Amino acid sequence: AQSVTQPDIHITVSEGASLELRCNYSYGATPYLFWYVQSPGQGLQLLLKYFSGDTLVQGIKGFEAEFKRSQSSFNLRKPSVHWSDAAEYFCAVGGLGNNNDMRFGAGTRLTVKP
Amino acid sequence: GAVVSQHPSWVICKSGTSVKIECRSLDFQATTMFWYRQFPKQSLMLMATSNEGSKATYEQGVEKDKFLINHASLTLSTLTVTSAHPEDSSFYICSARDTSSGKGELFFGEGSRLTVL
């Protein structure tokens, strides 16, 4: 069964500092991986996705993620965090194919210090 | 990407009443839609898979008589919370599968926040 683990419940970084949010997955076949961001009271916004090909994926808002099959990881990175990046971040696996729903990690809450 | 719309965005109801939430795929047909539930400060939990023209498939622990799902057309799925109680207060999010691109990618609605008084 597919599953996603986000080891960090809450991360605090200073504005301008670099960011890495961790995501590990368990999946029986080629994984389709996603990162979403959610602001309080809002829906999900897709940051980036990985289906195949280049393992370094560029997304919106300056985010990128790298798929590492050997580590079963898909960590999200940003070189310089802005105060507006404070939100909840979800990693998800699956979501493609006729019988494939999407499973979410528990989420990582990002706080940005001035 | 494809657009999925949910209505209403916010709903407040009295305990014991029923509430219907709609999920529409605006620019594509979706034979499969999914309903998720999100409690405050928690992740999204899959409730059920909605298939057009057939009965929904519910995840373990989700009461099918409590959460009625109807997927009567290729662009609309509805979730009805019957005899709602305060513990049903939550954020409900739907997603729809767009198979036109070949990947069958999921697109999410904006979510519907239910508050039961």
Image (spheres, helix red, strand yellow):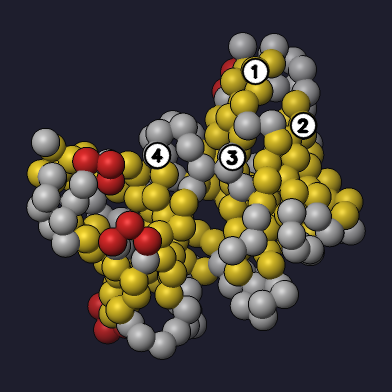
Residue identified by numbered label 3: B111
Residue to which mark 1 is pinned: B12
Contact flag, marks 4 and 1 (Cβ < 8 Å): no
Give me the chain letter of mark 1: B
Residue B60 seen in render? no
**Mark seen at residue B20:** 2
Residue lying farthest bottom? Answer: A53
In the displayed structure, A87 sits above or below B98; it is above
Sequence-earlier tag: 3 or 2: 2
Please report whichever mark, 1 or 2, sits nearer to the chain's N-terminal start. Answer: 1
Q: Quadrant of residue A52?
A: bottom left
Instruction: Tell me whether the residue at label 4 lies in contact with that at label 3, contact meaning CB atoms closer than 8 angstroms.
Output: no
Task: Name the residue: 68% across, 64% down.
Answer: B97
Q: What is the CA distance from the residue labelled 1 to the residue labelled 3?
A: 14 Å
Left/right of residue A89 with respect to residue B22 in the rendered view: left
Q: Is residue A48 above or below residue B80?
A: below
Q: Nearer the viewer, residue B24 or A30?
A: B24
Alpha carbon distance from label 2 to label 4? 25 Å
- Asked whether the viewer can see residue A13, the reply is yes
* Parent chain of label 4: A
Q: Which residue is mark 4?
A: A39
